[in-house]
Amino acid sequence: MAKRHKKVLIDTGVVIGFLDGKESVRKEIYEVIGIENVYISTVVKFEIYYGMLKKEEKATRQFFKEINHVRLDAEISDIAISFILTHRREKVKLPDCLIASTAKSLNMELYTYNTQDFDYLEGVKLYKPKYKEKG
């Protein structure tokens, strides 16, 4: 049973790791965070379905049934626009802006392997996993 009660938004790479069966990701989600505290952005859901193979569909749909979803709204959009306008030089990617703004809007930590895509965005708290990815 997870000891944390903090809500955590997971990024696309984390979902891929989970679906690929990476033990460190599964333990982090089930034992540390708690599946009931795991959230996914609409953007991540789109990215996963976009890159998914037909044979992965069943497992993907099952995982998405287990976790909480966050839809984009006006506040998330406004924060994303602010990130875009503030970070034009860094050429911040639109999906990353939307994912980061979701985490910021809902005061969630963002669990990602691509910390360099988010660590310069103001107010975005990155999740530090207990279990490290191997390999």
Image (tube, rainbow, N blue to C red):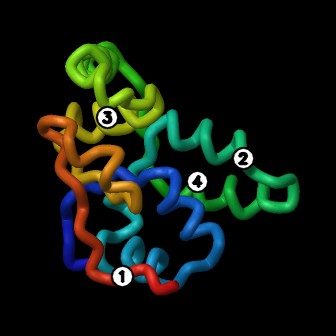
Q: Position of residue 114 (x, y in %)?
A: 39, 55
Give amino acid for label 3: Thr
96, above or below 73, in the image: below
Query: Can I make out residue 99 in this image?
Result: yes
Q: Which mark is first along the chain, 2 or 1?
A: 2
What is the residue that sits farthest to the front in this orientation?
89
Q: Quadrant of residue 73?
A: top left
Q: Quadrant of residue 56?
A: bottom right
109, above or below 95, in the image: below
Q: Residue at x 44, y 26 (%)?
A: 94
Give amino acid for label 1: Lys
Query: Which residue is the site of mark 4?
Result: 65
Left or right: 115 as drawn, with respect to 61: left
Q: Which mark is first along the chain, 2 or 4?
A: 2
Query: Which residue is the site of mark 1?
Result: 132
SS class, disc 2: helix
**CA–CA distance in space, label 1 to label 2:** 25 Å
Give amino acid for label 4: Lys
Which one is in front in this view, the residue at disc 4 or the one at disc 1? 1
Judge the density around disc 2: few (<14), some (14-19), many (≥20) Cα neighbours within 10 Å.
few
Query: How many marks can you see?
Result: 4
Tell me the quadrant of the picture where the N terminus can be found. Answer: bottom left
Query: Can I make out residue 1 in this image?
Result: no
Q: Position of residue 134 (x, y in %)?
A: 47, 86
